[in-house]
Image (cartoon, helix red, strand yellow):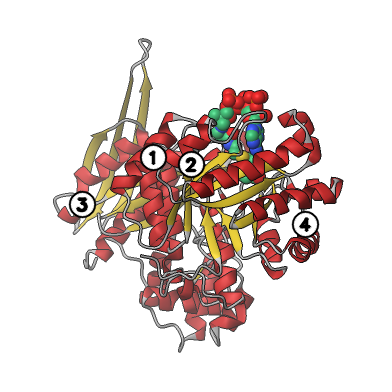
Amino acid sequence: MSSLSDEFHVFDTTLRDGAQREGINLTVADKLAIARYLDEFGVGFIEGGWPGANPRDTEFFARAATELKLENAQLVAFGATRRAGGTAEDDAQLRALVASGAPVVTLVAKSHDRHVDLALRTTLDENLAMVRDSVAYLRAQGKRVFIDCEHFFDGYKANRTYALSVVRAAHEAGADVVVLCDTNGGMLPGGVREIVADVLAETGARLGIHAQDDTGCAVANTLAAVDAGATHVQCTANGYGERVGNANLFPVVGALELKHDRRVLPEGRLAEMTRISHAISEVVNLTPSTHQPYVGVSAFAHKAGLHASAIKVDPDLYQHTDPALVGNTMRMLVSDMAGRASVELKGRELGYDLSTDRELAGRVVDRVKEKELAGYTFEAADASFELLLRAEVQGAQDRFFTLESWRAIAEQRADGSTANEATVKLWAKGERLVATGEGNGPVDALDAALRAAVGRFYPQLAKLELTDYKVRILEGQHGTGSKTRVLIETTDGESTWSTVGVAENVIGASWQALDDAYTFGLVRAGLNP
Ligand SMILES: CC(=O)SCCNC(=O)CCNC(=O)[C@H](O)C(C)(C)COP(=O)(O)OP(=O)(O)OC[C@H]1O[C@@H](n2cnc3c(N)ncnc32)[C@H](O)[C@@H]1OP(=O)(O)O
Ligand SMILES: CC(=O)C(=O)O
């Protein structure tokens, strides 16, 4: 069972509020998988959904009872206070919360007088009774209860006395935590800090914070609430949630652990943060945000030459924390903003020592800048950069084959069918090689022809697979005469690398990127040209 103290709660609502994000549609199996990741990360509470609101959430709790073995977290069922005019005992959705088997229940309650009037269409007193009855009923059923006071901050500004009376009603009825919700996400940190401090002083209730991110301040608002005395933070993995999202779990936990020096995760789990964030992105089928604080692949990536020159002396000069603490890594990007230090550090990352040869590093920088001016990009094409670096280090390019010419034919027939054929003429190991290939498109045909031509010399090519292909038109104002940049991603089954080509036509650019992709693959396989 959990080794976490109850003094501070990290409460995750990815499976409830996170699932309210447009574009997320989780199966029960997805929800179980995410719950396992969150538990592994070490959150204290996992809100699984609203049992009774839809069959999927009901099934989730039923399956969780037998299939989820949580080590750190407690499962939480979400629902609303009883219906106006009814009783808690007869309320079907409160009974579904009990039946869910979850030991903890979060109830959403109205705390803004205008919402009671317009959305619930009942009296302010009846809303207080709904809160009291629902909490008391669930407590009598042995549940721990948290209350989410919806629209709390807006309600406090409109009618402070009433908003405070909802907090007191919940607290006195036995709610363990009263969570102040910025439901419309319009708050800023100063206001949150002030209001949380006042509510704490006035009611003495244990307070939590649930901040939507509509002003881009959800993480800051969450931390402001903690500064003011909240001891329960509601967050979602990667900030998923209704509209623009919720307070992102990872920067909130990162700040609490690393900036506030507060232990909110079990020992050793912070270093799993990057992996867990990416794993959850995979399950929800959304590309991880590369620029997410702490866990994004760019979170510790340095592009500017000035940064690199200082990082060479001490990485902490340009990073707010050690990336290893959150399971991330520092990366150097080489582009036309690089200087010698960037190239030296990138070289070190790739296993080349340039520290003793300033002139060599300078030549690499010049070459990168010249090629980037012509449209190449090396920060997204690590393998093309390494080949460029090797050419400068060795004084010659790696050449396993040399192009004499290529030709590609794309045929569109009247019946709608297509045919694509390519011919390459190459030199390898002193022989002139001519081969043709067919494919789904002209680049696929070119790839087939290249493999057909040199495959017998380099059987290692059979292992290589192209996994991604991106085209970007540069200098768009020239229409069909513009330059084209192609980025190709290739794998040998063990690692993946990217290469770039730039030309006035897409097939020429693709050829260059293919040439680099296969050359790099052969270098990686340990061959010498
Ligand atoms: C701020 C948040 O994000 S809270 C989470 C919100 N999540 C969701 O809404 C997702 C799940 N919701 C659902 O599946 C459905 O809305 C259900 C099953 C909960 C309810 O469905 P329905 O019974 O068809 O009602 P509907 O969605 O149209 O309206 C909500 C009802 O709940 C009432 N209600 C709203 N908040 C509360 C509350 N805190 N306590 C009690 N009743 C409430 C509304 O007044 C309305 O009542 P009405 O049916 O008498 O008009
Ligand atoms: C409860 C909740 O999700 C909100 O108030 O935003």
Q: Nearer the viewer, residue 448 or 264?
A: 264
Residue of label 3: 463
Which mark is in front, 2 or 3?
2
Task: Please tell me which residue is depicted at 53% across the width and 62% down the height of the picture.
Answer: 10
Horizontal side, residue 139 vs residue 524: left or right: right
Q: Quadrant of the C terminus?
A: bottom left
Query: Is disc 4 in contact with disc 1, using a CB cutoff of under 8 Å?
Result: no
**Relative to 195, residue 284 above or below:** above
* Real-space CA distance between mark 3 and mark 1, rounded to the nearest whole angstrom: 42 Å
Task: Please tell me which residue is depicted at 77% across the width and 50% down the height of the picture.
Answer: 165
Residue of label 2: 49
Q: Quadrant of the N terminus?
A: bottom left
Residue of label 1: 60
Task: Please tell me which residue is depicted at 25% across the width and 40% down the height of the picture.
Answer: 449
* Real-space CA distance between mark 2 and mark 4, rounded to the nearest whole angstrom: 28 Å
Q: How many marks?
A: 4
Query: Is disc 1 in contact with disc 2, using a CB cutoff of under 8 Å?
Result: yes
Which mark is in front, 2 or 4?
2
Establish whether ligand 1 lies closer than 8 Å to the Cβ of label 2: no
* Real-space CA distance between mark 4 and mark 3, rounded to the nearest whole angstrom: 54 Å
Instruction: Give the residue at the far top of this rendering.
Output: 415
Q: Position of residue 207 (x, y in %)?
A: 66, 60
Q: Earlier in the sequence, mark 4 or mark 1?
A: 1
Q: Nearer the viewer, residue 458 or 176?
A: 176
Q: Earlier in the sequence, mark 1 or mark 2?
A: 2
Residue of label 4: 188
Horizontal side, residue 294 vs residue 37: left or right: right
